[in-house]
Image (cartoon, rainbow, N blue to C red):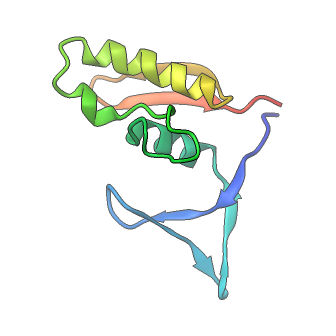
Amino acid sequence: MAKQQIDFALTAIDQQHDDITIAAGDFVLAESTLQHGKQLIYNDKGAFKENPTIGVGVYGYLDDEDGLQNLIRDTVKEFNRDGMHVDSAEIDASGMLNVIAHYPD
Protein backbone atom coordinates (compact mmCIF):
# COMPACT_ATOMS: atom_id res chain seq x y z
CA MET A 1 0.00 0.00 0.00
CA ALA A 2 1.26 3.47 -0.87
CA LYS A 3 2.19 5.87 1.89
CA GLN A 4 -0.66 8.21 2.79
CA GLN A 5 -0.14 11.95 2.93
CA ILE A 6 -2.32 13.55 5.58
CA ASP A 7 -3.12 17.26 5.51
CA PHE A 8 -6.03 19.59 6.13
CA ALA A 9 -8.98 18.49 4.01
CA LEU A 10 -10.10 20.99 1.39
CA THR A 11 -13.60 21.47 0.05
CA ALA A 12 -14.06 22.86 -3.45
CA ILE A 13 -15.87 26.19 -3.42
CA ASP A 14 -15.80 26.45 -7.20
CA GLN A 15 -13.55 25.33 -10.07
CA GLN A 16 -10.61 27.50 -8.94
CA HIS A 17 -10.91 27.83 -5.17
CA ASP A 18 -10.76 25.44 -2.25
CA ASP A 19 -11.35 26.11 1.43
CA ILE A 20 -10.38 24.27 4.59
CA THR A 21 -13.04 21.81 5.73
CA ILE A 22 -14.38 22.31 9.24
CA ALA A 23 -16.59 19.78 11.01
CA ALA A 24 -17.77 19.83 14.63
CA GLY A 25 -15.83 23.04 15.18
CA ASP A 26 -12.44 21.59 14.18
CA PHE A 27 -10.29 21.19 11.08
CA VAL A 28 -10.75 17.93 9.20
CA LEU A 29 -7.66 15.91 8.25
CA ALA A 30 -7.73 13.68 5.18
CA GLU A 31 -5.53 11.90 2.65
CA SER A 32 -4.01 14.66 0.50
CA THR A 33 -2.11 13.15 -2.42
CA LEU A 34 -4.67 14.48 -4.93
CA GLN A 35 -4.54 17.89 -3.28
CA HIS A 36 -0.73 17.98 -3.55
CA GLY A 37 -0.90 17.01 -7.22
CA LYS A 38 -3.48 19.70 -7.95
CA GLN A 39 -1.31 22.32 -6.25
CA LEU A 40 1.73 21.27 -8.27
CA ILE A 41 -0.20 21.42 -11.55
CA TYR A 42 -1.89 24.79 -11.03
CA ASN A 43 0.93 26.75 -9.36
CA ASP A 44 3.78 28.33 -11.27
CA LYS A 45 7.39 28.12 -10.23
CA GLY A 46 7.96 30.76 -7.58
CA ALA A 47 4.49 30.41 -6.06
CA PHE A 48 5.83 28.66 -2.95
CA LYS A 49 8.31 30.72 -0.95
CA GLU A 50 9.61 27.60 0.81
CA ASN A 51 10.52 25.90 -2.48
CA PRO A 52 10.40 28.36 -5.39
CA THR A 53 11.52 25.89 -8.05
CA ILE A 54 8.49 23.56 -7.87
CA GLY A 55 5.31 23.84 -9.89
CA VAL A 56 4.04 23.12 -13.38
CA GLY A 57 1.96 26.25 -14.11
CA VAL A 58 -0.60 24.61 -16.39
CA TYR A 59 -1.90 27.91 -17.79
CA GLY A 60 1.49 28.68 -19.33
CA TYR A 61 1.01 25.80 -21.76
CA LEU A 62 -2.11 27.19 -23.42
CA ASP A 63 -0.27 29.12 -26.13
CA ASP A 64 2.54 26.58 -26.61
CA GLU A 65 2.49 24.70 -29.94
CA ASP A 66 3.81 21.54 -28.28
CA GLY A 67 1.98 22.38 -25.06
CA LEU A 68 0.26 19.08 -24.42
CA GLN A 69 3.38 16.92 -24.68
CA ASN A 70 5.41 19.45 -22.70
CA LEU A 71 2.66 19.62 -20.07
CA ILE A 72 2.70 15.85 -19.62
CA ARG A 73 6.51 15.74 -19.46
CA ASP A 74 6.75 18.60 -16.97
CA THR A 75 3.92 17.25 -14.81
CA VAL A 76 5.64 13.86 -14.49
CA LYS A 77 8.94 15.61 -13.72
CA GLU A 78 7.43 17.79 -10.98
CA PHE A 79 5.49 14.91 -9.42
CA ASN A 80 8.71 12.87 -9.32
CA ARG A 81 10.58 15.78 -7.73
CA ASP A 82 7.88 15.92 -5.06
CA GLY A 83 8.48 12.24 -4.30
CA MET A 84 5.50 10.76 -6.14
CA HIS A 85 5.66 7.73 -8.40
CA VAL A 86 3.66 8.43 -11.58
CA ASP A 87 1.88 5.36 -12.93
CA SER A 88 0.40 7.19 -15.93
CA ALA A 89 -0.08 10.69 -17.30
CA GLU A 90 -2.11 11.50 -20.39
CA ILE A 91 -4.43 13.99 -22.03
CA ASP A 92 -7.78 12.35 -22.76
CA ALA A 93 -10.04 12.98 -25.77
CA SER A 94 -11.83 15.82 -23.96
CA GLY A 95 -8.54 17.60 -23.22
CA MET A 96 -8.36 16.70 -19.52
CA LEU A 97 -5.00 15.97 -17.95
CA ASN A 98 -5.25 12.63 -16.13
CA VAL A 99 -2.43 11.68 -13.78
CA ILE A 100 -2.35 8.57 -11.63
CA ALA A 101 0.38 8.95 -9.01
CA HIS A 102 1.15 7.97 -5.45
CA TYR A 103 3.81 8.42 -2.82
CA PRO A 104 5.81 5.19 -2.47
CA ASP A 105 6.06 3.37 0.85
Residue 101 x %, y %: 61, 29
Residue 49 in percent (x, y) is at 52, 48
Coordinates of residue 2 in the picture (x, y in percent): 78, 34
Residue closest to the far bottom: 25
Residues 47 and 83: in front is 47
Q: Quadrant of residue 60?
A: top left
Q: Residue at x 68, y 57 (%)?
A: 7
- Residue 85, compared with residue 47, is above or below; it is above
Residue at 58% across / 46% down in the picture? 50
Quadrant where the C terminus is found in the figure = top right
Q: Nearer the viewer, residue 83 or 1?
A: 83
Compared across the picture, whether 75 is left or right of 33 comes to left
What is the tally of numbered marks visible in this picture?
A: 0
Indicate left or right for 19 with 70 as reference: right
Quarter holding the N terminus is top right
Q: Residue at x 50, y 46 (%)?
A: 48
Q: Residue at x 38, y 29 (%)?
A: 97
